[in-house]
Image: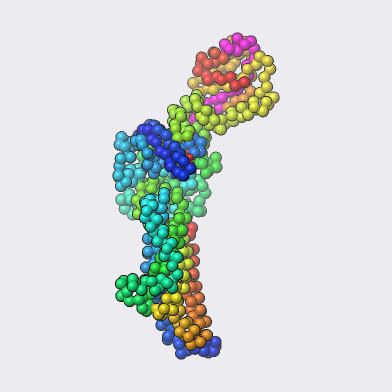
Amino acid sequence: MGIIYQIFPNLEKLAPELMKCTGQTVQMVAVSGIISFFFGLFFGSLLIVTRKGGILECVPVYNVIDKAIDILRSIPFLILLFLLIPLSRAIVGTSLGVEGAYVPLIFGTVPFFSRQIETAIAEVDPGLIEASEAMGFSPVEIIFSVYLRESIPGIARVSMITLISLIGLTTMAGAVGAGGVGDFAIRYGYQLHQRDTIWISVIITLIMVSIVQIVGNFVIKKTKH
Amino acid sequence: MIELKNVTKTFNSAAGNVHAVQNVSLKIEDGEIFGIIGFSGAGKSTLVRCINLLERPDSGEVIIDGSDIVKLPEKELRTVRRKMGMIFQHFNLMPSRTVYNNVGFALRKSGLSKEEKDKKIRSLLELVDLSDKIDSYPSQLSGGQKQRVAIARALANDPKILLCDEATSALDPQTTRSILRLLESVNKKLGITIVIITHQMEVVKDICDRVAVMETGSVVEEGRTADVFSHPKMPVTKSFIETAGNIGKIYELIKEDNPLTRLNPGERMYMLTYTSVNTKDAIISYVSRTYNVNASIIFGNVEVLKDIPLGKLVVVFSGEKDNIDAAVQYIRSVGIDTEEIK
Ligand SMILES: Nc1ncnc2c1ncn2[C@@H]1O[C@H](COP(=O)(O)OP(=O)(O)O)[C@@H](O)[C@H]1O
Ligand SMILES: [Mg+2]
């Protein structure tokens, strides 16, 4: 412990604050990650089935989602943070703190993730869909039992990538008052010139990213045959 | 019975319209093995997909056991589809599921209890001789084994019809034969009507009772396999016969002016095509003696179409012109297809 406190002189006194901020980051990533996950699966699948030649072909629906994703993805996250203040107030009742970050984080993640899910599902062999249709399965059954089920390794891969980029987004949300590790780095590292706290934030982030990668790779390994 | 009436399907694409299936009418009887042969792009897959309506025809009727399924709403159509198995060139097994679960997948809506499903899956895998691979994943199986799993899956809901789209095209000749034997036993044991789409003459020759020949979206010839291939009417049918066996070789040799095919003055070369009806009589030696012509056989080939032998002989006759004419006329009169090829 002594050595660690030598390298990071401010760690001892800031440890409780660091724990709190890490907890906030985990909370933001977990809540918006889980919500984004379901939205992403939904929109990604919807893109696949409504595209031309899809099992529920409906090109207008496809076009609307497709364009909406492109537009949302082209808005820089920092601007999205401010842009969504009214929406956040309307939905979660506040635009401040951890709760206030959920809406922008979800809006910043879902378009990217939906696109990634679309790509992952698109890798499912069309022959499997043909076979399932021939076996008399309905489109909904095919979405769950074939498209999603057969692309679990791909979904795990893109979820991993998205979760890592979501961790990045939370630090930005922190910059505008949501708390978390990013907020910690700015307050102590940048504003108070305690450079070791920046390194501490880097390490904490690296640990979170590594955990995501380890879990993701484990899932991929277990589900790929 | 499967009855197609004036089935037409056109694909519209940027590059123009493709008339994949044009006004096809076919009747496939219960319990028969029906082949549809044609070169790539002839429209075979589209046609077979019209039978279970994976492809909806633009017009025409698809009558299964007396009712036109084109008119059915999606939900009922799915029930009908469960009574039609289908297998594919690339097997289309679910990579994330074991052999057991691949077959089990087809039983999801069967309404059977867990125990009944288990029993069913095991008996199906026994039928296709794969009981030892029950917990393997498709990636651990050979092509032939994958197709066996696909057959087990296709049979899971006790279908009355099995559609096979190029089911053996990705397999080596030996595996192809073993899969064909399996299909044959499925047809005999379970009485399932089998529709086989293929571009391989060997397949049709081996197991099809009847065959339809397709070209550019249309059925150009149809009938009992032995009849169609012993008396082909269309060039496309003839070219299939040439791809099977080696009789097509003779045309190449003639073209190359191979010494074997060179004729002396007064000699004529004929291709004789005969089926079991007339194979047993000593026709060549009979005409040779009776009409005083020399007959030398320079090329011969016997195919077995389903159970009927189909022989082809290339014979060079020499002698008096009138005698040769008379000999040929006699041969024709006993029902042997005789064509002068040089
Ligand atoms: N979904 C499709 N869209 C456009 N053209 C198609 C489609 N499916 C098949 N075709 C065209 O229809 C023709 C017949 O195809 P197909 O039925 O697959 O032939 P085969 O199985 O005999 O090789 C081909 O020219 C093919 O390119
Ligand atoms: Mg085909």
Image quadrant where one finds the C terminus of chain B:
top right
Q: Which of the colour schemes (rainbow, by chain, secondary structure, one colour) is used?
A: rainbow
Q: Residue at x 37, y 68 (%)?
A: A35
Q: Is residue A43 visible?
A: yes
Given residues A65 and B240, the one toward you in this image is: A65
Q: Residue at x 49, y 25 (%)?
A: B233
Q: Is residue B131 visible?
A: no
Based on the picture, tell me whether residue B319 belongs to the magenta stretch. Answer: yes
Would residue B11 be found to the left or right of residue A1 on screen?
left
Q: Residue at x 45, y 65 (%)?
A: A74
Q: Is residue B271 above or below residue B166?
A: above
Given residues B87 and B175, the one toward you in this image is: B87
Q: Residue at x 33, y 50 (%)?
A: B109
x and y, in percent, of residue A139 in the image: 36, 52
Based on the picture, tell me whether residue B22 belongs to the magenta stretch. Answer: no
Q: Which residues are magenta?
A: B302-327
Q: How many marks?
A: 0
x and y, in percent, of residue B138 in the image: 48, 52
Q: Is residue A9 above or below residue B341?
A: below
Given residues A45 and B171, the one toward you in this image is: A45
x and y, in percent, of residue B74 in the image: 32, 46
x and y, in percent, of residue B208 in the image: 45, 33
Image quadrant where one finds the N terminus of chain B:
top left
Would residue B91 be found to the left or right of residue B315 on screen?
left
Q: Is residue B301 above or below residue B156?
A: above
Given residues A16 and A2, the one toward you in this image is: A16
Q: Is residue A127 above or below residue A223?
A: above
